[in-house]
């Protein structure tokens, strides 16, 4: 801290003392004090002020030099609030508390970023592991189909197509996961026909549904204002989940209900259902539950992404289920700027 900066910061106090000294000297002279005594009083006052300012300057200079030295030596400079030297001054204590609060906020933000980085790395690692399955399946099918007869070749091509669809779903998952933090930059809000979206998703997975003998019914009579691409991804994840935990003679029903203040989209299946103790956690990141642990390939990311994207789109996502009796996934589109407009 330079002396000039210190004096410039205290100029109001200097001015106040100068005015007070002028007022006092005038008063003393007017009340009969001798000029000599008045000058002595002013000199004594000036010396006191000089000593006091010099002492304060030295103290402040040492304090800030110590703080600068600590900052230079610290490896983690965001911990400065914990390392600042003690001070008897109220303003120093207040500043230190504010710096501590800022440091705490920075540490929390850093931890969140580290957690996100770790979660993303772990997810990518699991995604790579899951992707090897379809790739290996395609390679084996191609190898076995080299000398296959026309009938067998047709079945081989169908199987390759299904493995390719699995691979495409995995790629979609990691892409949407990567974009999930900045969904609003990719919004394209427009009037969306939910029936067309549902039928398109079912058509996309037709070979899988046909192989598993799934009967699908679509009765969506309402349109909403939302992002068609993101809703398509959400429905696709839900249909894949319903297929993964299907039962014998599986049936999927997708329909809409118009409510007073919005539209409700319902996806219902007659699959295994979700145990009651798992129902409140199915949207948590990485949660697979008892059903997921009994199957390979469950990552617990599908429904987590669905909830995250729904929150970004302003859609309420709920789940209703009874174990052994099927599951209902409900997407509620309230009336608003992003949703259904009359």
Image: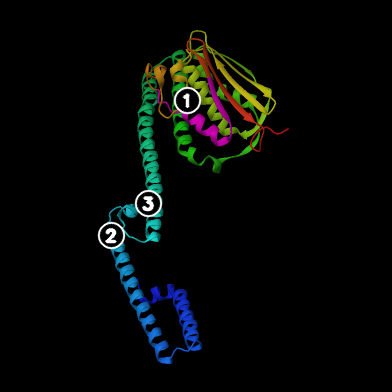
Does 305 sit left or right of 133 as displayed? Answer: right
Residue that mark 1 sits on: 165
Could you tell me which secondary element the residue under label 3 belongs to? helix
Q: Nearer the viewer, residue 84 or 12?
A: 12
List x then y, in percent, for residue 239.
52, 21
The nearer-to-camera label among 2 and 1 is: 2
Give the tally of numbered discs.
3
Q: Earlier in the sequence, mark 1 or mark 3?
A: 3
Count neighbours of disc 3 (C-alpha within 10 A) and say few if under 14, some if 14 to 19, many if 20 or more.
some
**Residue 227 vertical position relative to residue 247 in the rendered view, above or below:** below
List x then y, in percent, for residue 238.
52, 23
Q: Which mark is residue 70?
A: 2
Could you tell me which secondary element the residue under label 2 belongs to? helix
Task: Tell me which segment is drawn in magenta.
Answer: 298-319
Residue that mark 3 sits on: 100
Q: Residue at x 51, y 10 (%)?
A: 325
List x then y, in percent, for residue 95.
40, 57
């Amino acid at each position: 801290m330079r002396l000039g900066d210190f004096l410039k910061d205290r100029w109001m106090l200097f001015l106040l003392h100068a005015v007070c000294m002028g007022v006092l000297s005038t008063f003393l002279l007017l009340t009969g004090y001798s000029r000599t005594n008045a000058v002595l009083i002013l000199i004594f006052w000036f010396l006191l002020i000089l000593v006091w300012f010099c002492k304060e300057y030295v103290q402040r200079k040492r304090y800030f030099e110590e703080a600068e030295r600590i900052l230079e030596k610290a490896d983690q400079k965001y911990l400065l609030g914990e390392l600042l030297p003690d001070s008897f001054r109220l303003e120093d204590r207040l500043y230190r508390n504010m710096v501590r609060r800022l440091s705490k906020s920075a540490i929390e933000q850093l931890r969140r970023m580290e957690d996100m980085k770790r979660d993303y790395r772990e997810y990518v690692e699991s995604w790579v592991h899951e992707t090897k399955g379809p790739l290996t399946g395609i390679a084996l099918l191609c190898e076995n189909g080299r000398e296959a007869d026309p009938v067998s070749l047709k079945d081989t091509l169908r199987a390759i197509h299904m493995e390719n669809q699995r691979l495409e779903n995995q790629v979609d998952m990691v892409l949407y996961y990567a974009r999930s933090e900045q969904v609003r930059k990719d919004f394209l809000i427009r009037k969306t026909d939910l029936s067309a979206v549902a039928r398109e998703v079912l058509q996309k997975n037709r070979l899988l549904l046909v192989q598993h003998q799934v009967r699908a019914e679509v009765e969506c009579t309402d349109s909403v204002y939302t992002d068609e691409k993101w809703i398509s991804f959400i429905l696709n994840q839900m249909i894949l989940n319903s297929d993964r935990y299907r039962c014998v003679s599986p049936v999927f029903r997708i329909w809409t209900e118009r409510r007073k203040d919005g539209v409700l989209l319902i996806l219902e299946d007659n699959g295994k259902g979700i145990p009651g103790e798992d129902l409140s956690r199915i949207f948590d990141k990485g949660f697979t539950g008892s059903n997921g642990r009994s199957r390979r390939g469950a990552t617990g990311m599908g429904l987590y992404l669905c909830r995250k994207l729904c929150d970004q789109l302003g859609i309420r996502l709920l789940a209703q289920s009874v174990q052994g009796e099927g599951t209902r996934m409900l997407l509620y589109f309230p009336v608003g700027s992003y949703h259904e407009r009359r």
